C-alpha cells in the first residue's frame, strides 16, 4: 500500500471519527460544559468560599486545570471505546481488516478521533472556566504538550478497552469502577499536601495525579509533583499503551475471534 493511499485512509478514518461526535454535539460537547459550570458553582463558589485560598490561589483557580483535564480524559477515552466497540458490534471493522490497511493507520485513526474530541471538549470547558476564574497560562507550550499526550494516552486506553470488550456492559465497567475513582482521587479538588503522610504516599501510585499536576503547572505554575517526573511518566505510559495497542491489533485480539 503506497504512502499516498495510507495517508488517504488515515484522513478518511479521522474525518469519520471526528464527524461522529460533532454530529451529536449536544450529547458529546455540551454536557461537559454544563457539568463544569455546576462544579464551579457548587465547589468553586459555594464550598470554595468556605475553604479559602489554596497555594495562594482562589479555590476556583486551583480546581480549574483539574476540571479541564477531567473532561479531556473522560471524553478522549469514551470516544474511542464506544467507536471501536461499535465497529466490532456492527461488524464493519472487518472491512478494514480485509483491506491492505496497516494496523498502525487503523490505530492512529481511532486514537486521532479520541484526541480530537478530547481537545474539542477541553477548549469548550476552558472557555466555561474563564467565566468563573482567571487562568494565567504560565507555560503555554508545556500545557499544550501535556494535554495532547494525556488525550492520546486515554484514547489508547479506550481502544484497549474496546478491543477486549465483549458486550456493551464491558465498555462501562472500566470508566465506572477504575477511571472515575482515579480521576477524583487525582488531586482535582485538593492538594495532596493536605493529606496525612500515608495518603500522600498512596496518592503517588495514581498516574492521573501526575497528569493533573503537570497541567496545573503549565497553567498556574504550581504543582505537588516534580514536573520532570510527571512528564516522564506521562510519556512512558503513552508509549507503552501505543505499543501494546498495536500488538493487540496485529494479533487480532478481540476482532478476529
Image (cartoon, rainbow, N blue to C red):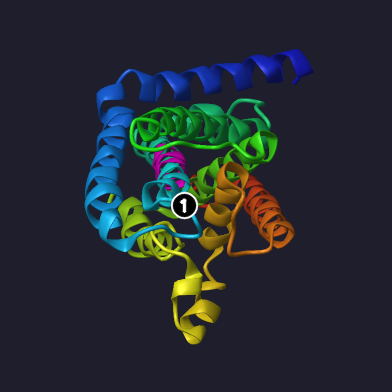
Give the extent of the magenta segment.
69-79
- Tell me the quadrant of the picture where the N terminus can be found: top right
Residue 248 in view (yes/no): no
Quarter-wise, where is residue 33 in the image? top left
Residue at which label 1 appears = 57
Quarter-wise, where is residue 182 in the image? bottom left
- Residue 70, percent across and down? 42, 48
Residue at horizontal 58%, vertical 64%?
224
Question: Residue 75: within the magenta?
Answer: yes
- Residue 194, percent across and down? 45, 73
Q: Does dot 1 land on a helix, a strand or a loop?
A: loop
Residue 98 in view (yes/no): yes
In the image, 125 versus 25, the foreground residue is: 125
- Residue 189, percent across and down? 38, 59
Quarter-wise, where is residue 210 in the image? bottom right
Question: Residue 8: within the magenta?
Answer: no
Q: Is residue 135 above or below residue 59?
A: above
- Residue 177, percent across and down? 33, 64
Circle 1 residues within 10 Å: few <14, some 14–19, many ≥20: few
Q: Is residue 141 above or below residue 54?
A: above
Residue at horizontal 38%, vertical 53%?
59
Amino acid at each position: 500500500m503506497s504512502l499516498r493511499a495510507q495517508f488517504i485512509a488515515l484522513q478518511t478514518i479521522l474525518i469519520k471519527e471526528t464527524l461522529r461526535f460533532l454530529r451529536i454535539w449536544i450529547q458529546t460537547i455540551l454536557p461537559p460544559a454544563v457539568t463544569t459550570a455546576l462544579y464551579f458553582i457548587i465547589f468553586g463558589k459555594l464550598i470554595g468560599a468556605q475553604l479559602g485560598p489554596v497555594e495562594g490561589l482562589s479555590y476556583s483557580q486551583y480546581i480549574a486545570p483539574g476540571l479541564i483535564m477531567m473532561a479531556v480524559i473522560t471524553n478522549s477515552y469514551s470516544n474511542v471505546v464506544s467507536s471501536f466497540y461499535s465497529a466490532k458490534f456492527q461488524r464493519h471493522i472487518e472491512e478494514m481488516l480485509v483491506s491492505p490497511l496497516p494496523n498502525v493507520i487503523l490505530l492512529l485513526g481511532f486514537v486521532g478521533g479520541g484526541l480530537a474530541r478530547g481537545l474539542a471538549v477541553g477548549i469548550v470547558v476552558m472557555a466555561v472556566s474563564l467565566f468563573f476564574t482567571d487562568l494565567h497560562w504560565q507555560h503555554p507550550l508545556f500545557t499544550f504538550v501535556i494535554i495532547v499526550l494525556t488525550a492520546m494516552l486515554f484514547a489508547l486506553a479506550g481502544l484497549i478497552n474496546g478491543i477486549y470488550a465483549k458486550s456493551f456492559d464491558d465498555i462501562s465497567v472500566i470508566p465506572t469502577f477504575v477511571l472515575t475513582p482515579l480521576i477524583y482521587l487525582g488531586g482535582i479538588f485538593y492538594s495532596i499536601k493536605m493529606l496525612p503522610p500515608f495518603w500522600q504516599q498512596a496518592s503517588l501510585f495514581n498516574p492521573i495525579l501526575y497528569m493533573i499536576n503537570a497541567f496545573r503547572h503549565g497553567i498556574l505554575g504550581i504543582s505537588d509533583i516534580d514536573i520532570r517526573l510527571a512528564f516522564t511518566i506521562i510519556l512512558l505510559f503513552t508509549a507503552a499503551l501505543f505499543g501494546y495497542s498495536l500488538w493487540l491489533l496485529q494479533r487480532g485480539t478481540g476482532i478476529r475471534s
